[in-house]
Every structure is written in structure tokens, then in C-alpha cells.
Image: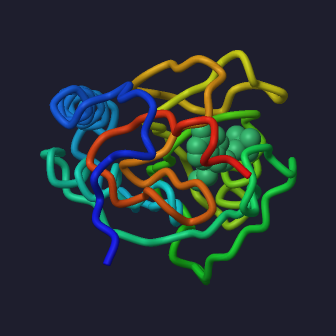
Amino acid sequence: MKFKDGKDIKKVLFTKGRIARGVNRAARWLDGKLGGAYAVGICTLKGGMTFYCDLIRKMKTPVQTEFIRASSYGSGTVSRGTAEICGDFGVLLKGRTVVLVEDIVDTGRTVCALKKYLTELGAERVIVVSLLNKPSRREVAACADYSVFDVDNLFLVGYGLDYAERYRDLPYIGVLKDEIYV
Ligand code: IMP
Ligand code: MG
């Protein structure tokens, strides 16, 4: 059996502690922004899962939890540029405040497509919160209302983020050794 020993990681960029402090800041910001409104929290699968679960437990405002799936990456490290969206909300979002939670905004295409999709389903307000943001990679006008950490143009893994479906289960965020990328 193979264990998580971190030997594929070249550098840890965000430790568990630093992430936790960032999640706290995002929770306080959201509490302020929502002002007590009962929102629908939508977790973007799969990358947003860890951040989402930590975030809603730190928020004082209660949220209803839903999931949405957006895939743009395939198994590589370069965005395919289009997001396939999969989510079934019916009339649930009509007139509601939605908090969309993402792992990372890279080109910005995924969050923008998701925001448009949720707005078309009748959401009154869509607040986009992302853990990470790569401003240098932006191709479309930024749609995130809050992002916790800005990062350089590096491919990151851990805390929900994957490379070829691996490393999502690391408790920190880091960069893989060059030889791991195929
Ligand atoms: P965008 O549409 O280019 O903004 O891509 C956003 C999606 O690509 C994110 O939700 C992630 O799933 C994925 N992604 C972007 N950068 C990284 C990264 O550094 N590591 C892992 N996944 C990433
Ligand atoms: Mg994602």
C-alpha cells in the first residue's frame, strides 16, 4: 500500500494552519456579506469540497448545502477552456441568495459560466467565494467576489485540488515535483 508521505511534493505553499486562518477570514467576510440571510451554499465538485466543508463550519450564518459539478481540466494541467456543468436544482434557486464556493479561479471561465448558469436558474444574487486566485491567468473578467489567497501561475495540488484525480486528500497545498507531471 502507498501512504501519503508527501514525497511527490516539491514545495508546500499553504500549510494547514495558514489555510485554516484564511478559511476563517472568508467565513467572517461571508457572514458580513449575508447579513443573516439564509442562503444556498453550492459546493463546486470536486475541487471545492474541502474548502466548502471547512468554510460552512466556520460561518455563523446557516446555509443550505447543494452541489454542482464543473469540469474543464480533464487530467492535465492546462484548462480546456470550456466548463461542462452538471447540477439539478429545479426551482430551488428562484429568488434565493446563492454562495458559490470554488477551489481556484484560473482563467475565470469556470466561475463565470457557473455564475451565469445559476443566475439563469433564477438566483437573485450569486456570491462567488474562491480559496485561490491566479490573477496572471485571467482570460475573462473576474467573477469572484472574494478569494482568500492570490497565487502565481503554478499548478497546485492538495486540500481538494488534484492532478489527474490525485492529491485532493492532502491537508496542505503545494507544488508537485516536475517529474510527476507526465
Ligand atoms: P478556470 O476555468 O480556468 O478558471 O479553471 C478553474 C478550474 O480549473 C478550477 O476549478 C480547478 O478545478 C482547475 N484548476 C485550475 N488551476 C488549478 C491548479 O493549480 N490545480 C488544480 N486544479 C486547478
Ligand atoms: Mg474546480
The quarter in which the N terminus is drawn is bottom left
Q: In this view, does 13 lie above or below 104?
A: above
**Percent coordinates x, y for residue 14 in the rendering:** 32, 28
Confirm whether residue 65 shows in the render. Answer: yes
Q: Which of 106 and 99 is in front in this view?
A: 106
**Percent coordinates x, y for residue 163 in the rendering:** 59, 54
The structure residue drawn at horizontal position 55% and vertical position 39%, both measured from the top left corner, is 104
Q: In this view, does 129 lie above or below 22?
A: below
142 horizontally vs 175: left or right? right
33 horizontally vs 112: left or right? left
2 horizontally vs 54: left or right? right
Q: Determine the image quadrant of residue 64.
A: bottom left
Q: Which of 95 and 109 is in front in this view?
A: 109
Q: Which of 149 and 169 is in front in this view?
A: 169
Q: Determine the image quadrant of residue 10.
A: top left
The structure residue drawn at horizontal position 48% and vertical position 45%, both measured from the top left corner, is 157
**Percent coordinates x, y for residue 31 in the rendering:** 23, 37
The structure residue drawn at horizontal position 16% and vertical position 54%, both measured from the top left corner, is 57
The structure residue drawn at horizontal position 71% and vertical position 63%, both measured from the top left corner, is 71
**Percent coordinates x, y for residue 6 in the rendering:** 33, 46
